[in-house]
Image (tube, rainbow, N blue to C red):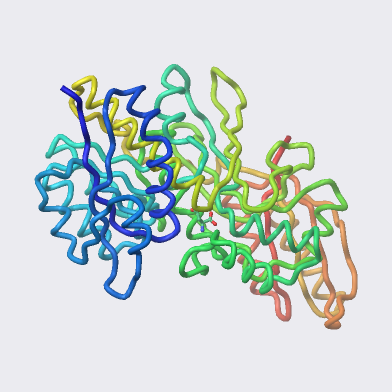
């Protein structure tokens, strides 16, 4: 007998509309490959929305109460593409508890409440898939989960926020002002509904939590690591970095140091010859170091309706495949490791440190003395009078460990009229 999976979709915004359209386009191909027909029967929207054109074109019943989907016995899979935590969490919980598979693109939800939701999915023998939550159109999660099974991942780092990469590209290449670049990213549909999450690194941090889960089987929380975005980034720093052979990129990274994990989201100096340096605009790139493969990189669009929706539909096709094989709903990733953090003294990097102080030789000597006291070696790459009448000093340091770095930042913050305006890791080739 022909198999059919009925789907209810929560949200018909940019991604939801893409899911409806891509599924209609690829339905035959998925059916040929899996023997299962995927059909969206109902869509949850808000009363104020008018989606009647899309509904008529695709034979969808529009509903305004989630129970019409979560309590519909005919529906096998719920696709959540509303975003944000509430009420998405309650809706996903209800769907899983009603024994429905769930596919979502919601990184906020999966980063913050993943563990709880996986337990509910497991208890009800259904799958919870979220390939679209990290790096939009790049199939990175399934790659980490499946294709590295015979390998040991030691580091995952990448450009995983399309909005900020778009902004940095436009600011550097087209001289666009920060605010204009952000506005354009919003118009293009890359930015979050609250773009603070993009520019302050929070969106990249959610994705770093999920990448850590897939790389090491460990769940970390946002509070466990440093998260800094690109707000207030100075063109002078980006240009100076370029002059010495680096592109400034917002990097989300998670690495194994000894048995512990070290994660961070912050702007960093990427050598111009590194493949991540070439990633422009809203594109994302995820660079993986592992003991077997060595270095590999995955590149593609990190945001936008069609790429994100395509990843959602791929998750649906995998559920169809499992169904066709009569497999007991497999989970996306199996957990194994306890949370353990790297020793901060074992984590080191070179740094680009930009400082501002007043034009007073005594104060510069105090900065230099702080460096000597903490064993910080550096090259002075800029020492100029800035337009605001302050002295701008920029150093490129030798390797500092996390403890030394924090101590240096704290020592400089105690020097009067002096502050560190930017501190960025210098990535190696
Ligand atoms: N705001 C996100 C970004 C959307 O710019 O990458 C995709 O997660």
Q: Is residue 326 above or below residue 52?
A: above
Give the position of the C terminus as an image quadrant.
top right
Tell whether 15 sits left or right of 170.
Answer: left
Q: Is residue 267 above or below residue 29?
A: below
Give x and y (percent) for residue 109: 33, 55
Give the position of the N terminus as an image quadrant.
top left
* Residue 3 lies in quadrant: top left
Give x and y (percent) for residue 218: 36, 39
Which residue is more in the foreground, 43 or 310? 43
Tell whether 309 sits left or right of 280.
Answer: left
Tell whether 385 sits left or right of 42.
Answer: right
Which residue is more in the foreground, 324 or 242? 324
* Residue 418 lies in quadrant: bottom right
Q: Is residue 338 above or below residue 180?
A: above
Q: Is residue 155 above or below residue 16?
A: above
**Residue shown at 78% from the left, 37% from the top:** 273
Tell whether 409 sits left or right of 65.
Answer: right
* Residue 55 lies in quadrant: bottom left
Which residue is more in the foreground, 182 or 155? 182
**Residue shown at 62% from the left, 26% from the top:** 295
Give x and y (percent) for residue 288: 56, 32
Q: In the displayed orientation, state which residue is furthest to the right.
A: 384
How many discs mark residues in the rendered view?
0
**Residue shown at 58% from the left, 34% from the top:** 298
**Residue shown at 54% from the left, 61% from the top:** 189
Give x and y (percent) for residue 95: 17, 50
Which residue is more in the foreground, 166 or 296? 166
């Amino acid at each position: 007998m022909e198999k059919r999976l009925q789907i209810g979709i929560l949200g018909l915004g940019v991604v939801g509309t893409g899911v409806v359209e891509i599924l209609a386009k690829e339905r035959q191909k998925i059916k040929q490959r899996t023997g299962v027909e995927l059909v969206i029967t109902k869509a949850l929207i808000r009363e104020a929305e008018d989606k009647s054109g899309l509904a008529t074109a695709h034979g969808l019943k529009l509903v305004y109460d989630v129970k019409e989907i979560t309590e519909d016995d005919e529906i096998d899979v719920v696709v959540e593409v509303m975003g944000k935590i509430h009420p998405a969490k309650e809706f996903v919980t209800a769907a899983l508890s009603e024994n429905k598979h769930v596919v979502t693109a919601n990184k906020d939800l999966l980063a913050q409440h993943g563990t709880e939701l996986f337990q509910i999915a497991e208890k009800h023998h259904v799958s919870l898939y979220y390939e679209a939550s990290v790096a939009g159109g790049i199939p990175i999660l399934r790659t980490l989960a499946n294709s590295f099974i015979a390998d040991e991942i030691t580091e995952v780092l990448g450009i995983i926020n399309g909005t900020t990469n778009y902004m940095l590209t436009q600011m550097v290449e087209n001289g666009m002002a920060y605010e204009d670049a952000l506005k354009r990213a919003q118009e293009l549909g890359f930015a979050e509904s609250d773009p603070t999450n993009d520019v302050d690194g929070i969106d990249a941090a959610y994705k770093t939590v999920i990448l850590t889960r897939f790389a090491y089987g460990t769940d970390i929380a946002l509070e466990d690591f440093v998260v800094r975005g690109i707000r207030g980034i100075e063109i002078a720093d980006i240009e100076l970095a370029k002059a010495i052979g680096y592109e400034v990129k917002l990097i989300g990274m998670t690495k194994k140091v000894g048995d512990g994990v070290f994660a961070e989201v912050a702007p960093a100096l990427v050598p111009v010859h590194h493949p991540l340096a070439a990633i422009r605009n809203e594109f994302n790139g995820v660079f993986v170091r592992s003991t077997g493969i060595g270095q590999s990189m995955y590149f593609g669009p990190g945001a936008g309706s069609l790429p994100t929706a395509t990843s959602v539909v791929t998750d649906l096709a995998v559920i169809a495949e499992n169904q066709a094989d009569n497999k007991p709903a497999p989970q996306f990733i199996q957990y194994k490791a306890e949370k353990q953090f790297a020793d901060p003294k074992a984590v080191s990097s070179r740094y680009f440190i930009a400082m501002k102080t007043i034009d007073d030789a005594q104060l510069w000597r105090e900065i230099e003395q702080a460096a000597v006291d903490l064993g910080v070696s550096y090259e002075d790459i800029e020492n100029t009078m800035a337009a605001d009448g302050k002295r701008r000093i920029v150093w490129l340091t030798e390797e500092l460990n996390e403890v030394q770095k924090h101590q240096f930042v704290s020592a400089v913050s105690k020097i009067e009229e002096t502050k560190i305006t930017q501190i960025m890791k210098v990535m190696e080739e």
